[in-house]
Image (tube, rainbow, N blue to C red):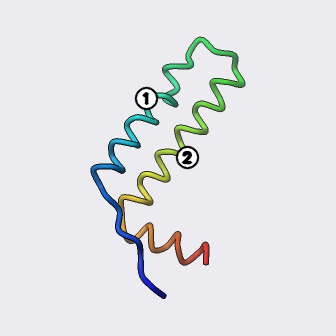
Amino acid sequence: MRGLPAIEVTDLERRFRDRSRLLHPDRHARAEPRERRLSLERATRLNDAYRALKDWRLRAGYALRAA
C-alpha cells in the first residue's frame, strides 16, 4: 500500500465553505419539499465527506473500505 495522499487543508476548507454556502438548507427554505430534502441530504453528505477528508484516521478507514 502506498499510503494516503496528502491533503492541502487550506484548499479543502475553502472548497468546503464554498460548497456549504450553495447547499445550506437555509438557502432552500422556500423551495418545494423535495428540494429542501435534497438540500439537507447533500449538505449532510458534504459535512460527512469534509470530516473524513480532514481527519487522516477517517480518511484511512474510508480508503481501506473502498479498496
Judging by the rendered image, the residue that carries numbered circle 2 is: 45
Position of residue 8 in the picture relative to residue 25 (left or right): left
How many residues crowd mark 2 within 10 Å: few (<14), some (14–19), many (20+)?
few
Q: Nearer the viewer, residue 18 or 26?
A: 18
- Where is residue 19 drawn, in percent x and y? 46, 36
Quadrant of the image occupied by residue 34: top right
Judging by the rendered image, the residue that carries numbered circle 1 is: 21
Position of residue 31 in the picture relative to residue 17 (left or right): right
Q: Residue at x 49, y 51 (%)?
A: 48
User: Label 2 sits on what residue type?
Assistant: Arg
- Where is residue 17 drawn, in percent x and y? 37, 37
Considering every residue shown, the one lying at the far bottom of the view is 1
Q: Residue at x 35, y 68 (%)?
A: 6
Q: Residue at x 56, y 16 (%)?
A: 29
User: Label 1 sits on what residue type?
Assistant: Arg
- Label number found at residue 47: none
